[in-house]
Image: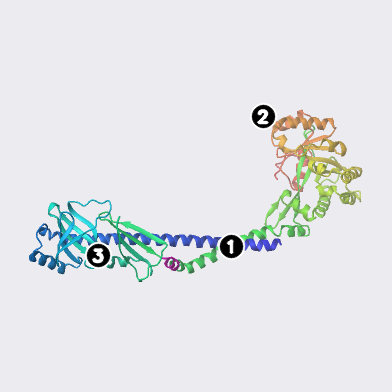
Amino acid sequence: MKRAMAVVGLVLLATVPSVLIIALVGWFVTDQVQQDLAQAAAGSTLESDRLIERSAAELRELLDLAGQDCTPEVVARLSDATMRSSRVGSIGLLSADSVVYCTNTGPTTLVTAVPTGRAVPAEGVYVGWIENSLAGGRSIVVHVRAGTRGGVVGRIDPEEFLERIEGNLVGPRGALLISIIDGPTLGRAAPHSEWYLTRYVARARSTQYPIEIEASTDEGYVWSRFLQYIPLLVVIGVGIAGLVLWVAVLMLRRRRPLDEDLALALNRRQFEVYYQPIVDIQAGRCVGAEALLRWRHPKRGLLRPDVFIPLAEQTGFIIPITRWLFDRVRADILLSFPEQEHIHVGINLVAEHLRDTHVVEDLKALFADGALNPKAITLEITERQIIDNFRETAIEVMERIHELGCSIAVDDFGTGHSGLAALQRFSVDYLKIDKVFVDTIGTDAVSRPILDSIIDLGHKLQLELIAEGVEQRHQVAYLRARGVRYAQGYYFSFPLTLASFARFYREYNGVVPATTVSA
């Protein structure tokens, strides 16, 4: 089940980057299309402005006819100008009240529409439209006015605009729509007669004339642009997915086999024992050490107990590991301290050891040949383990350990529940004061009085006290003054290999000249 979930997790982990990249490219393509539409609308607006300006320039040449009667001579001149113009479809004279009364085809009466809200200037260029003009439909008209004399007007078919701007179409189904602001739509440029509903639109307005142009395209064009990136997406997606999978597999390999490696660690001789010295601060002598188990993992390096001991408890490997630790400590003591005089080594037990008597049988085997004195071994059990295992089996285990001649220490005292009742029921020899309380010495910490309470409790119960985590000289002085007998911590030494601890023990106790001892 876990493996299947891991596989699903890997697939999802590899898929997420690809999905994110696809979404990012989709956003990029959409943004590019919107920019293209904006440029198309702006460019088309500039083209329409140029057409109007050039048409207005042609009409200005006829301003001298403004206000004249529609005589054959005037009509002929208007007709000639229309024939010569490539932009203006028809030309007429405009009265002061915006009525076209004469065109290149003769007298007429036409009214040009004024966009809502736009005032007609007395002079200059004005753009409007004509409904139902001579060419039918709507046409754009350009007025060039000359004050009270009226002016000249030119009709420009919207197709003239559309022909000039259709090169700005975006996509095969793109469209360009030209309109009079506050007025009607005049025409649209599109490659098909059918008008497609579009999703992507951009608009631009002329800064000089009431002209607005809308550029649009459909989703098909956006999709076609997106498909252009598919080869690149495939390469990037496969690369990132492969990289993510590779990293994930490495991480899984780093985590997954830990329980499997734990089963092989003993046979592969990967466990090591370090010794942290314990000093009698009243007598100024080193009296022993706490045995600290380490796992030198081939890939993860040196692992602390809090990394693998919980796993060993869950998998049941804690029993053979502890048995190995017993044998290793026995061998180390017999090798480096054959006289076993005044040497005590603490070995940590876990809750599993209090649930049946197998640990007692293992200890019996340890002392069976009489080579190792049981007094050299102290079994350390945390306060929480005692509380959580407050049952007859645990009491029996601890009593039988005492019967063998070993001492029992309560580790991390003060950090668990209130263990006074358990201390009165269980037979223990030492209380180990946790580092968290030792650190309060010389401070104003709220928890500082707890240290004094633990010390007083130990004295009242006639238990020896061992302070853990001692790192400062003033801590040693305070503990010594309060009657604490034993201490361990970096102030005295880091955890040491067997050879370094044996040298430290002899030098500290003045057996050999002192030299620098390093961990």
Q: Nearer the viewer, residue 220 or 491?
A: 220
Q: Is residue 334 at least partly visible in the picture?
A: no
User: What's the residue at 70%, 42% (across, down)?
Assistant: 516
Q: Secondary structure at mark 3?
A: loop
Where does the magenta region start and end? Answer: 218-224
Question: Looking at the picture, which amino acid does disc 2 mark?
Answer: Asp
Q: Secondary structure at mark 2?
A: loop
Residue 310 drawn above or below residue 160: above
Local packing at callout 2 (Cα closer than 10 Å; few below 14, some 14-19, many 20+) is few
**Quadrant (top left/top right/bottom left/bottom right) for the N terminus:** bottom right
Q: Which residue is mark 2?
A: 444
Mark earlier in primary sequence (2, 3):
3
In the picture, the disc for residue 222 is none
Q: Looking at the picture, how far across and down is residue 34, in whole percent?
A: 40, 60
Q: Which residue is mark 3?
A: 132
> Within the image, what quadrant is residue 470 found in?
top right
3D distance between C-alphas at marks 1 and 3: 64 Å
Question: Looking at the picture, which amino acid does disc 1 mark?
Answer: Ala
Question: Looking at the picture, which amino acid does disc 3 mark?
Answer: Asn
Is 247 contained in the magenta span? no
The overriding secondary structure of the stretch rendered in magenta is helix
Mark earlier in primary sequence (1, 3):
1
3D distance between C-alphas at marks 2 and 3: 97 Å
Q: Looking at the picture, how far across and down is residue 275, in whole percent?
A: 76, 45
